[in-house]
Amino acid sequence: MPALNDVLAALDALWPPERAEQWDAVGTVCGDPEAEVTRVLFAVDPVQQVADEAVRLGADLLITHHPLYLRGTTTVAATTFKGRVVHTLIKNDIALHVAHTNADTADPGVSDALAGALDLRIVGPLVPDATDLEGRRGLGRICELDHPETLREFAGRAAARLPATAQGIRAAGDPDRTVRRVAVSGGSGDSLFDAVRAAGVDAFLTADLRHHPSSEAREHSDLALLDAAHWATEWPWTEQAAAQLDEISDRHGWGLRTHVSRIVTDPWTAHA
């Protein structure tokens, strides 16, 4: 079985930490580099429910998309909920590793997994990484549908293929307009409207769309908008990432057992 250091080296090759945004907090939060790793759990959020699931599974490593400490801290006391997560993991010999914006722009990355869940054909990145000469890395993806659909039908496709949440899928635009070409971006995407308009797509599917940016985007053009839950747009990455680690494990003969958390950690629990 590999040591944690071996697995972390493989993860850093998939999602190099130097490609994370400067404000981000990626990498290993806790864990003994020499500890043996046999079982790995992937999840979006490092919350207590997920830490408890890792304990029940007997996982040695928890890999999450969202950071536990994004803005730093002065304490890991168990009197705070983040401190309880750290205590739970360390007491049970479970390491925590985070791949956030470095996984967003990877090839494949978070938006590739989102496009795959929606069964879309990827044309290229929405915001290309200037350092990638092959033009495959970057934020978001420009995609094409296998056949034209109405906005209503495409929203139904998203609702059926993404994990269910209380929010569901909100759409802005004429429900009967034709959608052929779309942009997708896992997580919060309303900072990308300029790039989306420049891409000439019919619709943009992302999460956390706020009132004013969305209203202004709709006034600016007839771009259709689809707003899904943040967690739902990023959860497909956990399956993709687990498959990537499975392939690495098979290649090295590690025999790792990977699991994907299906606990819905979206904070919204009801829709009236």
Image (cartoon, rainbow, N blue to C red):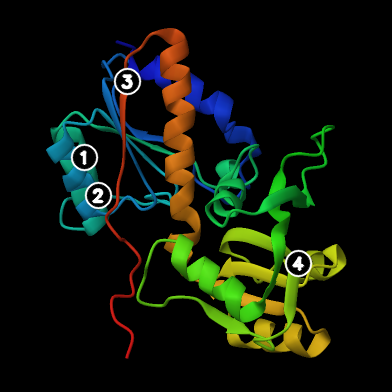
- Residue 4 seen by the camera: yes
Task: Name the foreground residue: 150 vs 254.
Answer: 150
Q: How many marks?
A: 4
The nearer-to-camera label among 1 and 3 is: 3
* Earlier-in-chain disc, 1 versus 3: 1
Query: In percent of the image, x 65 and y 72: which residue is there?
Result: 190
Disc 2 target residue:
50
- Spatial CA distance of label 2 from label 1 is 6 Å
Contact flag, marks 2 and 1 (Cβ < 8 Å) = yes
Q: At numbered mark 4, what does the secondary structure look like: helix, strand or loop?
A: strand
Contact flag, marks 1 and 3 (Cβ < 8 Å) = no
Disc 3 target residue:
256
- Spatial CA distance of label 1 from label 4 is 41 Å
Q: Amino acid at mark 1?
A: Ala
Contact flag, marks 1 and 4 (Cβ < 8 Å) = no
Q: At numbered mark 2, what does the secondary structure look like: helix, strand or loop?
A: helix
Identify the image quadrant of the C terminus: bottom left
Q: Quarter-wise, where is residue 2 in the image?
A: top left
Disc 4 target residue:
180
